[in-house]
Image: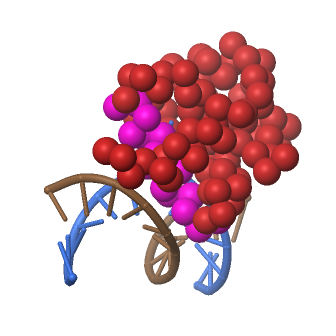
Chain colours: A red, B blue, C brown
Amino acid sequence: MEKEDFYQRVFEVVRMIPRGKVTTYGAIAKSLGVASAARMVGYALNASISSKELNDLPCHRVVNRNGELTGKIHFGPGTMKYLLENEGIHFKNQDTIDIKNHFWNPEL
DNA sequence: CGAATGACTCACT
DNA sequence: GAGTGAGCCATTC
């Protein structure tokens, strides 16, 4: 697979996410130049899990626009929440974080 | 190449 | 404000 150009872009942005901060799929997609490709961002992260080489990817810091841990389904139940809490992320609900308080803009 | 799928988002009800 | 439907782009079959 050498056409992972889109994926690599996503990985690169996700890696830039500072510890204790989170971002949204739409924000990442926008920084890639394709604001409407929010679904592709999640798709790329899903592919990253398949590639154990990318285990450095803090995909647990990526949530949907609502702050819900939609990705925990593929990441692993409980794992995503644990990692985020370990970084000081405050959870509003079991699967929802305070996105407004921890949001990080990848375009910066 | 056409059709289906998905870790999303927006608009409408 | 919550629930439902359609749109969106790239990858896979």
Q: Which of A20 and A5 is in front in this view?
A: A5
Horizontal placement of A57 versus A103: left or right? Answer: left
Query: What residue is rendered at 79% in x and 51% in y?
Result: A107
Horizontal placement of C9 versus A12: left or right? Answer: left
Image x and y of residue A91, in percent: 71, 28
Q: Is A41 a magenta residue?
A: yes
For the image, the number of numbered tags is 0
Image x and y of residue C9, in percent: 49, 69
The secondary structure that dominates the magenta segment is: helix
Q: Nearer the viewer, residue A53 or C4?
A: A53
Q: In which quarter of the image is the N terminus of chain A?
A: top left
Q: Is A42 a magenta residue?
A: yes
Q: Give the range drawn in magenta.
A: A35-50
Query: What residue is rendered at 85% in x and 37% in y?
Result: A101
Query: What residue is rendered at 55% in x and 28% in y?
Result: A57
Q: Can residue A46 be seen in this view?
A: yes
Q: Is residue A92 visible?
A: no
Query: Which image quarter: residue B1?
Result: bottom left
Q: Is residue C6 above or below residue A83?
A: below
Q: Nearer the viewer, residue A39 or A98?
A: A39
Query: What residue is rendered at 56% in x and 58% in y?
Result: A38
Image x and y of residue A40, in percent: 48, 56
Q: Which of A63 and A12 is in front in this view?
A: A12
